[in-house]
Image (cartoon, rainbow, N blue to C red):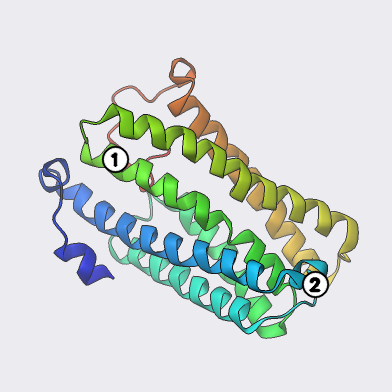
């Protein structure tokens, strides 16, 4: 995927800024993962809807492989950030990846809570449109209508595939999962992820819907941010 991303034509706005070339390639790989993982998560739940009745111990080969696949992507992206000296500008995503990798590895090893991971990976459907948004901003595509359309689609899928599954799993873990051992570890991970998701949602709203509320973003160089949230 990295080689394919490098082989694809790059917009002039990307080619003219060396700092954007890595970011563009990284986002294309992220986009590919989001498409594959998001559709895979939807298929797994559609194919085996009975999994939703047993979040703690439900199991499917498809779900297990999906969690392994996404764990591999998070490990790859972490190494990509570190080896390309982007750790400082992307530290929030290193924290996110560390949380995801540690949680997913525990699920793979124990075989428990795999359904919860599949539900969480529905977020990749939302990431498809978030990544399109970022690519449009980086490429300076002269198409306000395209950005506007994606902006509203992005908001809808953010609620449906990011906030809703996250809220449901938070409620489920706090109500039904014992706060000890793996359950305690995953609950703490989930609560930290809640805080991160709400923070990113706040940034997204300020940037796309309430730009007058943005603070300290004037003149900011987008090359200094991996995912261009603001």
Please tell me in which quadrant of the rendered image residue 101 appears: bottom right
Q: Nearer the viewer, residue 182 or 3?
A: 3
Residue 28 left/right relative to 158: left
Residue 129 left/right relative to 15: right
Residue at 67 percent across and 81 percent down: it is 60
Crowding near pointer 1: few (<14 within 10 Å), some, many (20+)?
A: some
Residue at 74 percent across and 66 percent down: it is 185
Residue 138 left/right relative to 214: left
Q: Is residue 230 visible?
A: no
Crowding near pointer 2: few (<14 within 10 Å), some, many (20+)?
A: some
How many labels, in total? 2
Is the residue under label 1 in contact with that under label 2 (CB below 8 Å)? no
Q: Nearer the viewer, residue 83 or 128?
A: 128
Q: Position of residue 9 (x, y in %)?
A: 13, 56
Q: Position of residue 115 (x, y in %)?
A: 70, 70
Q: Position of residue 25 (x, y in %)?
A: 26, 58
Above or below residue 108? Residue 42 is above
Label 2 vs 1, first from the N-terminus: 2
Dot 2 corresponds to which residue?
56
Q: Position of residue 191 (x, y in %)?
A: 72, 51
> What is the spatial separation of the Cα atoms under label 2 and label 1, in whole angstroms?
39 Å
Q: Is residue 32 visible?
A: yes
Above or below residue 100? Residue 129 is above
**Element type where label 2 sits in the image:** loop
Residue at 86 percent across and 64 percent down: it is 177
Residue at 81 percent across and 73 percent down: it is 181
Residue 139 left/right relative to 108: left
Labelled disc at residue 182: none
Dot 1 corresponds to which residue?
136
């Amino acid at each position: 995927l990295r080689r394919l991303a490098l082989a694809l034509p790059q917009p002039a706005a990307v080619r003219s800024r060396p700092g954007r070339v890595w970011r563009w390639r990284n986002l294309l790989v992220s986009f590919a993962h989001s498409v594959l993982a998001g559709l895979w998560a939807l298929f797994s739940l559609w194919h085996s809807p009975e999994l939703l009745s047993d979040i703690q111990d439900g199991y499917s080969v498809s779900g297990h492989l999906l969690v392994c696949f996404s764990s591999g992507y998070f490990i790859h992206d972490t190494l990509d950030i570190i080896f390309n000296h982007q750790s400082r500008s992307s530290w929030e995503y290193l924290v996110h990846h560390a949380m995801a990798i540690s949680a997913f590895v525990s699920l793979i090893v124990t075989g428990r809570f795999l359904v919860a991971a599949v539900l969480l990976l529905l977020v990749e459907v939302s990431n498809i449109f978030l990544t399109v948004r970022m690519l449009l901003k980086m490429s300076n595509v002269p198409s306000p209508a395209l950005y506007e359309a994606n902006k509203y689609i992005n908001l809808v899928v953010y609620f449906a595939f990011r906030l809703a599954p996250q809220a449901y799993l938070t409620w489920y873990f706090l109500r039904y999962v014992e706060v000890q051992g793996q359950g305690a570890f995953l609950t703490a991970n989930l609560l930290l992820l809640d805080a991160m998701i709400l923070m990113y949602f706040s940034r997204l709203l300020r940037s796309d819907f309430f730009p007058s509320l943005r603070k300290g973003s004037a003149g900011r160089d987008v090359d200094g941010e991996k995912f261009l949230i603001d």
